[in-house]
Amino acid sequence: MQPIPTLDHVVVNVRDQIDDGQETYRRLGFTLTPRGYHSLGSINHLAIFGTDYLELIAARPDDAQQAEILRAPIGLNGLVFGTENASQTYAELLDAGVSVDAPLKLSRPVEVSEGHREAEFRVVRLSPGTTAVGRVYFCQHLTRDLVWRDEWRHHPNGAIGVARTVIAASAPMTVGALFTRMFGADAVRPILGGFSLAVGLARFDIVTPAELARQFGDAAPAAEGRRDYMAALTFRTRSLDHAANALAAGTISAAREPDRILVPAAAAFGVALEFRA
């Protein structure tokens, strides 16, 4: 048996610039959770949606344990699938021939109306080097009530969920083949310029750099020598007007088209953002 692909969250790496990242995403119209400090040393803010979320991840400049965050490019650098049983997912991926690290437990303190509590997680990560696109892993939430809280789900830009992640790849089928091993032969389907993996109500599109440019133009992040990289996010919003008003209030330059609003990667810490109603 293979895991079912469901989206837990996406991760934008801001390296050691958590203050700037927080301010930028606030100006983009997202409500962010209070700053979190993981037991492993990383720092984060979350934008919580209906069933998934966006995470800004950072590290202290001198934290040798988080060198991976500090070395990685700024921008979208993590795709996280959900799991209800990290140990089972680990075994299933090994059986499928996917290189994964053993489950790891981590936590972070959370201040809520009920007082101080610990949010706890178990993660199963594809081993470093398994894919060049960035970090890919699974997350089991042991305290879901400390993440999906209604006071954090309301965003001025109207965002209610991640609809799509776009990965640029010189050979899209290489990434598609990895997802096929992970989730089964019928999980990945061909699309214009590449392949797509359905991830619950969202999808991961793996496309050529030319197709990325066709869809996002100058708003797309620069490859900066990378052959494969995570490039863009599409958010579902309650209203394009809500999104436009929030971006204007944050003095964010964005292009409005009949069916979408496009924020260039340069204005969103290295990832192009697309809002669709």
Image (cartoon, rainbow, N blue to C red):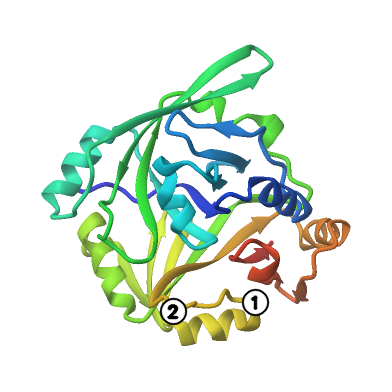
User: Which element is circle 2 on?
Assistant: loop
The vertical placement of 159 against 102, above or below, is below
Question: Residue 253 falls in which quadrant of the image?
Answer: bottom right
The vertical placement of 264 against 112, above or below, is below
**Residue in the picture at 19% in, 48% down:** 93
Find residue 208 and report its horizontal and vertical position in percent: 42, 82
The amino acid type found where label 2 is placed reads Gly
**Residue in the picture at 76% in, 58% down:** 239
Find residue 177 and report its horizontal and vertical position in percent: 24, 69
Q: Which residue is mark 1?
A: 219
The amino acid type found where label 1 is placed reads Ala
Find residue 205 and report its horizontal and vertical position in percent: 44, 69
In whole angstroms, how far apart are the C-alphas of marks 2 and 1? 17 Å
Is residue 171 visible to us here? Answer: yes
Q: Which residue is mark 2?
A: 225
The vertical placement of 234 against 5, above or below, is below
Q: Is residue 272 left or right of residue 243?
A: left
Q: Quarter of the image for the C terminus: give it.
A: bottom right
**Residue in the picture at 45% in, 28% down:** 39
Q: Earlier in the sequence, mark 2 or mark 1?
A: 1
For the residues bearing labels 2 and 1, Cβ distance under 8 angstroms:
no
